[in-house]
Image (spheres, grey):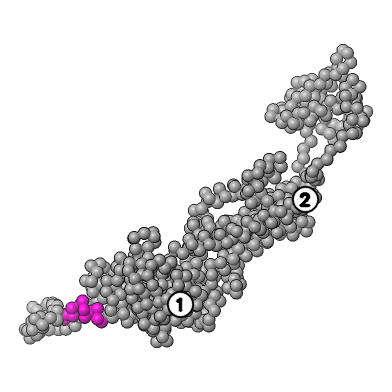
C-alpha cells in the first residue's frame, strides 16, 4: 500500500537531517507504528508522506504509483491526518468544525454527528470548542481526521494527553478502522500503545530506523524472558528473578524445590526495555 | 471553487468573533457619529484686524460703504487708538493682525502691517496687495491699478477647487476612509492567518483537497465584505449616495492591496503584534501620498509609484466630482493591475513559506 524508500528531510536544507535515509513499507489494512522519543523524526516522516512537508529526497509509492512531489487532490481525498495538537477552530462548535472539514472533500464523508458520538462528544456537539477540555479537543481533532473515511490514516500520538478510558475508546476506534481495511500509520512514544495496536513497529532515533519488526519478533530477537518467584523465608516475603536461559532453568527448578514458593510470575521484556537495548536511548 | 463557499462561511463565522473585526466596526460607528454630531461643518475663522487709523481715511471709507458697526460685528475689524493697543490685541489673539495708517504732510498715506510670528510670505504679499488696492480706491495718488486693468484680469484654473463650499466633516472623510477602511485589510488579514497558524487549523486544512489559493481567496472576500460594511457605515450617513459606487470601488481595491501584503506578513510572523514594526513602516509608506492630497503642489514623480497615491486621489475625485472623473478610472486601473500581480505573488510566497511548517 505504502512504500517509502531512502527518505530524507532537512528543515535547514543542508546535511542536518530530521529524517535520514528511512525506508519501510506498510501493507493495506495494517497498523504500522513508529516508536521513538520526542524529536526522533516521527512527525517529520508523517509530514513528508502526507504532503504537509516538501518531499526533498527519496521516493514514496502509494499502491505501486510514485507519489508526486506535490500530491494531487485525489491523494488528499484518500488520506486522513490526526495531529498531536488538537487543530480545532476554538470559536466554532464541535459540530461546525466537523461540518466545515466534511465540506472540503470530494468523496462521501462521515456524518459529523455520528463521529461525535463515536468519540463521546455527542452532548457537546453544539458547544464552542474553546470551552472544551484539552482531551475533548484532542478527540474532536481525532474525529476530524477520519471525516473523509480515509484509506490511509496517519495518526501522530493519537492517545497523548487522554485519560485511560478515552484512550481505550480511541484505540477501539483504530482497531475498528483497521478491520475495515484502513491502512494506519501511527507514531507514538508510548510503548503500550505501540504494543497493543501495531502489527509492526519501527524504532526510530535521530531520524534513522534502528529496528523494524513485529513486537513479538522484536522481543524474541532482542529480549530475554524471565521468571520472578516470591517465596517466604524466616517469616519474610522475598523475590528472586531467573532468566530463561538453559543454565538458569535448572537453577530455577532447584530453587522451587528448596524454597517455600508463594507466587511465580513469568515475564517478558517490555518494548521500552528492548528499545533501550537496541538504541541505547529511552522513550521520553 | 466550491470550497471557497465553505471556507467563506467558516471565515465569516470566525470573523464576526474576531476582536480586530469587531473593533473596526465599532470604530467606524463611533467615527461616523463624531463626523455627524461633533466635527463642525465649518471650521473657518475670520482673522481679527486691529486698525490704528490716525488719518481716519480707512475708517471713513468703511463707515461710508459698510457701516462701522456692521463692519466690527461681521468682519472682525476693530479700530484702536495706538500701536500698543494693536500689539496688546495681537498678543491676546494669536490669529489677529494689525494695520497702522498715517497721513503724510503731502497728502499721501503710510501704512504699516503688523503680522504674527511665522506668518507665511505668500499671505503677507496677498495682504499687502489688498491694502494697496484699497488705498488706490480711497486715494487717487495710489491708483496704479485702474479699474479697467482690474477688469481685464481673467483667472483660469486647470481644475476649479470647490473646497470652500464643502463642509469640513466631508472634506476629512476621504482620509478617514483611507486609514480606517483601506489600510485595515493588512492588519485583519494578518490576524486571521496568525489565528489559523497558532490554533493549528491551517495544518489540518493543508491535509484536505482544498487549495491554498481557495483558503486565501475566502479571506480576501471576507475582508472585502468587512470593508464594504465599514465603508457604508462611514460613507452613507455623511455623503449619502453621492459618488458612493466609485468611492466604494476605490476603497475595495485598496483593501485588497492591504490584504495581499497581510498574507505575506501573516506567513512570516506569528502574530500582528510581532510584525508591528513592519506594519507601521508599510502604513507610513502607504500614507505618504496623503501629503500630496493636502498640499497638491507637492507631487514628485516617485510619490506616484506608491499605489496608495492613486487610491487617495481617486477617492477624493469620486467624492467631490470636479470635472476630474478620469482620476477615478485611472486610479482603479492602476490599483487593479497592482492587485492582480500582488494577489498571485502573495499566494505563491505564502505557499512556499507555509510549506516549511509541519
Q: Is residue B13 visible?
A: no
- Left/right placement of residue B352 relative to residue A64 reads right
For image coordinates 50% across by 63% down, the residue present is: B351
Residue pointed to by mark 2: B324
- In the image, residue B181 lies at what x, y percent? 65, 55
Reply yes or no: does residue A221 show up in magenta.
Answer: yes
- In the image, residue A152 lies at what x, y percent? 43, 79
- In the image, residue A114 lies at what x, y percent? 50, 83
Task: Please report the bounds of the magenta region as a residue range.
Answer: A216-228
In this view of the protein, which residue sits in the foreground, A28 or B109?
A28
Q: Is residue B356 above or below residue A32?
A: above
Residue A156's quadrant in the figure?
bottom left
The answer for which chain carries disc 2 is B
Q: Quadrant of the C terminus of chain B?
A: bottom left
Q: Quadrant of the N terminus of chain B?
A: bottom right
Reply yes or no: does residue B278 show up in magenta.
Answer: no
Residue pointed to by mark 1: A79
Amino acid at each position: 500500500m505504502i512504500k517509502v524508500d531512502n527518505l530524507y528531510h532537512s528543515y535547514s536544507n543542508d546535511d542536518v537531517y530530521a529524517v535520514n535515509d528511512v525506508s519501510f513499507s506498510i501493507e493495506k489494512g495494517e497498523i504500522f507504528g513508529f516508536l521513538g522519543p520526542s524529536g526522533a523524526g516521527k512527525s517529520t516522516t508523517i509530514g513528508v508522506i502526507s504532503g504537509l512537508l516538501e518531499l526533498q529526497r527519496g521516493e514514496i509509492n502509494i499502491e505501486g504509483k510514485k507519489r508526486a512531489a506535490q500530491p494531487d487532490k485525489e491523494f488528499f481525498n484518500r488520506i486522513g491526518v490526526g495531529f498531536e495538537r488538537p487543530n480545532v477552530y476554538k470559536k466554532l462548535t464541535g459540530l461546525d468544525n466537523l461540518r466545515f472539514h466534511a465540506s472540503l472533500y470530494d468523496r462521501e464523508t462521515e456524518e459529523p454527528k455520528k463521529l461525535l458520538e463515536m468519540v463521546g462528544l455527542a452532548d457537546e456537539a453544539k458547544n464552542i470548542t474553546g470551552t472544551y477540555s484539552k482531551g475533548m479537543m484532542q478527540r474532536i481533532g481525532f474525529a476530524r481526521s477520519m471525516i473523509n473515511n480515509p484509506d490511509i490514516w496517519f495518526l501522530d500520538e493519537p492517545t497523548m494527553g487522554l485519560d485511560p478510558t478515552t484512550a481505550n475508546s480511541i484505540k477501539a476506534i483504530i482497531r475498528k478502522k483497521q478491520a475495515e481495511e484502513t491502512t494506519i500509520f501511527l507514531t507514538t512514544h508510548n510503548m503500550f500503545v505501540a504494543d497493543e495496536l501495531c502489527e509492526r513497529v519501527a524504532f526510530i532515533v535521530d531520524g534513522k530506523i534502528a529496528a523494524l519488526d513485529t513486537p513479538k519478533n522484536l522481543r524474541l530477537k532482542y529480549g530475554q524472558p524471565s521468571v520472578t518467584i516470591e517465596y517466604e523465608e524466616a517469616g519474610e516475603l522475598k523475590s528472586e528473578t531467573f532468566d530463561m536461559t538453559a543454565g538458569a532453568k535448572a537453577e530455577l527448578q532447584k530453587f522451587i524445590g528448596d524454597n517455600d514458593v508463594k507466587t511465580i510470575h513469568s515475564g517478558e521484556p517490555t518494548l521500552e526495555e528492548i528499545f533501550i537495548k537496541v538504541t541505547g536511548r529511552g522513550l521520553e | 471553487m466550491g470550497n471557497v463557499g465553505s471556507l467563506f462561511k467558516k471565515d465569516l463565522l470566525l470573523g464576526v468573533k474576531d476582536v480586530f473585526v469587531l473593533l473596526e466596526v465599532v470604530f467606524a460607528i463611533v467615527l461616523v457619529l463624531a463626523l455627524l454630531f461633533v466635527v463642525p461643518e465649518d471650521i473657518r475663522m475670520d482673522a481679527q484686524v486691529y486698525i490704528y487709523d490716525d488719518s481716519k481715511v480707512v475708517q471713513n471709507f468703511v463707515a461710508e460703504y459698510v457701516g462701522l458697526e456692521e463692519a466690527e460685528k461681521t468682519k472682525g475689524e476693530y479700530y484702536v487708538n495706538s500701536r500698543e493697543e494693536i500689539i496688546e490685541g495681537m498678543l491676546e489673539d494669536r490669529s489677529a493682525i494689525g494695520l497702522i495708517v498715517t497721513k503724510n504732510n503731502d497728502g499721501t498715506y503710510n501704512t504699516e502691517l503688523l503680522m504674527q510670528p511665522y506668518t507665511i510670505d505668500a499671505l503677507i504679499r496677498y495682504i499687502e496687495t489688498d491694502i494697496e488696492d484699497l488705498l488706490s480706491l480711497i486715494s487717487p495718488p495710489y491708483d496704479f491699478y485702474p479699474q479697467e486693468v482690474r477688469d481685464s484680469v481673467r483667472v483660469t484654473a486647470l481644475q476649479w477647487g470647490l473646497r470652500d463650499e464643502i463642509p469640513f466633516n466631508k472634506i476629512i472623510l476621504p482620509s478617514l476612509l483611507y486609514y480606517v477602511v483601506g489600510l485595515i485589510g493588512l492588519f485583519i488579514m494578518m490576524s486571521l492567518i496568525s489565528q489559523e497558524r497558532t490554533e493549528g487549523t491551517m495544518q489540518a486544512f493543508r491535509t484536505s483537497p482544498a487549495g491554498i489559493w481557495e483558503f486565501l481567496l475566502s479571506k480576501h472576500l471576507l475582508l472585502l465584505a468587512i470593508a464594504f460594511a465599514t465603508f457604508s457605515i462611514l460613507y452613507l450617513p455623511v455623503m449619502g449616495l453621492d459618488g458612493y459606487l466609485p468611492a466604494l470601488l476605490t476603497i475595495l481595491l485598496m483593501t485588497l492591496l492591504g490584504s495581499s501584503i497581510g498574507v505575506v506578513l501573516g506567513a512570516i510572523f506569528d502574530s500582528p503584534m510581532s510584525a508591528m514594526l513592519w506594519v507601521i513602516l508599510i502604513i507610513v509608506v502607504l500614507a505618504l501620498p496623503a501629503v500630496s492630497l493636502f498640499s497638491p503642489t507637492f507631487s514628485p514623480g516617485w510619490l506616484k509609484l506608491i499605489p496608495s497615491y492613486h487610491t487617495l486621489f481617486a477617492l477624493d475625485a469620486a467624492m467631490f466630482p470636479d470635472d476630474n472623473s478620469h482620476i477615478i478610472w485611472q486610479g482603479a486601473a492602476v490599483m487593479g493591475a497592482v492587485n492582480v500581480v500582488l494577489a498571485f505573488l502573495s499566494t505563491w510566497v505564502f505557499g512556499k513559506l507555509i510549506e516549511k511548517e509541519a
